[in-house]
Amino acid sequence: MDSNYNHHISVLLEESINILNIKPDGVYVDCTLGRCGHSKQILNRLNDNGLLICFDQDQAAIDYAKQIFANQNNVIIIKSNFKDLKKELIKRNITKVDGFIFDLGLSSPQLDDPNRGFSYQHNARLDMRMDQSQKLDAHYVINNYSFQQLCTIFSRYGEIKNPKRVVDAIIQQRQINPINTTFGLVDIIKQNSPLKLLFNKKHPARLYFQAIRIEVNNELSILEQSLNDAISLLNIAGIIAVISFHSLEDRITKKVFSKYTKNTLPKEVPISNYFAQYSLVNNKTVASEEEINANNRSRSSILRAMIKNY
């Protein structure tokens, strides 16, 4: 494990920990362990009767956490995608949880380690796997997906209006030689993007890389089910908190929370005394200007939370 890539500043850390309203003897699940930012703060608020369960599919994160929590008897570390959180918790006879935290997207170590192939700022083999034991990677996607498949993922997961010119160039280039590296892909994107994008503050490859990463890790299709699974395990007064970093993740979170918090009574029934089983803890919380200045990666973050009332 390379200690150079273990530095990570958790986004909206104080806000998310406060919103969980942690009980000292409660059961809490960090679904996206990363470099333990949220987990350390949760554990600091637990007594010996409290329990913290941490999930991550990245072996580097698991190895780091095992060092950090080496002598903690009330911490359980699970190497697994959060899509399996319900199965893994029930396997351990954990059926009631007082709080879940999902901190979606990439951690700084994943972005900063050039060998992981996530970043358009570092040259590396195209990879982008959060779980490095899985077969599908960015290299396969770029060199094997059809024209239509690439257009679909760039449109759907990158919300790119017209990716056809870039996709055409990818197809043409890989017929000559495989596209092996991040910079090789960046060059193709730059050469085939509208001129105005090249002078934009945001990198022209940003949304293409986002789309590939989402495809490789199946991020959006597992999110909705995972949120539903977490909610099904909430204790009374339990809270689920989600930090998202782009509109696609936030849209799914809003959709799921809305399903649970909407008024299901018939229109003709008076609602003056209606008390929903679930309610929103906040509308949405974003990073402060001070936090954005200190950590630019927080600029797009959104925190939403929901509580189970009974």
Image (tube, rainbow, N blue to C red):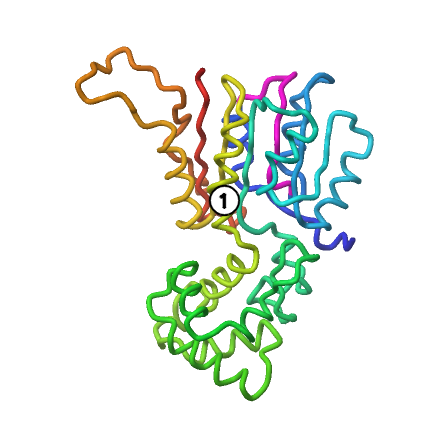
Q: Secondary structure at mark 1?
A: helix
Residue at x-position 24% and y-position 15%:
271
Quadrant placement of the C terminus? top left
Disc 1 residue crowd, few under 14, some 14–19, many 20+, Cα 10 Å: some
Residue at image point 40% right, 29% down: 282
Residue 164, compared with residue 255, is above or below; it is below
Q: Residue furthest left?
A: 268
Taking the spot 42% from the left edge, 25% from the top edge, the residue there is 281
Residue 161 falls within the magenta-colored stretch: no
Residue 31: x percent and y percent?
60, 38
**Magenta extent:** 21-33
Q: Nearer the viewer, residue 135 or 198?
A: 135
Q: Position of residue 207 (x, y in %)?
A: 45, 62
The residue identified by callout 1 is 223
x then y, percent, for residue 26: 62, 19
Most extreme residue toward the right, as rendered? Answer: 71
What is the three-letter code of the residue carrying label 1?
Answer: Leu
Question: In the shown orientation, is residue 39 left or right of residue 284?
Answer: right
Q: Quadrant of residue 140?
A: bottom right
Relative to 49, say whether 244 is above or below.
Answer: below
Q: Nearer the viewer, residue 6 or 88?
A: 88
Does 30 lie within the magenta span? yes
Depth order, front residue of 16/232? 232
When asked about the image quadrant of residue 119, the answer is bottom right
Q: Is residue 282 left or right of residue 97?
A: left
Q: Main secondary structure of the magenta part?
A: loop
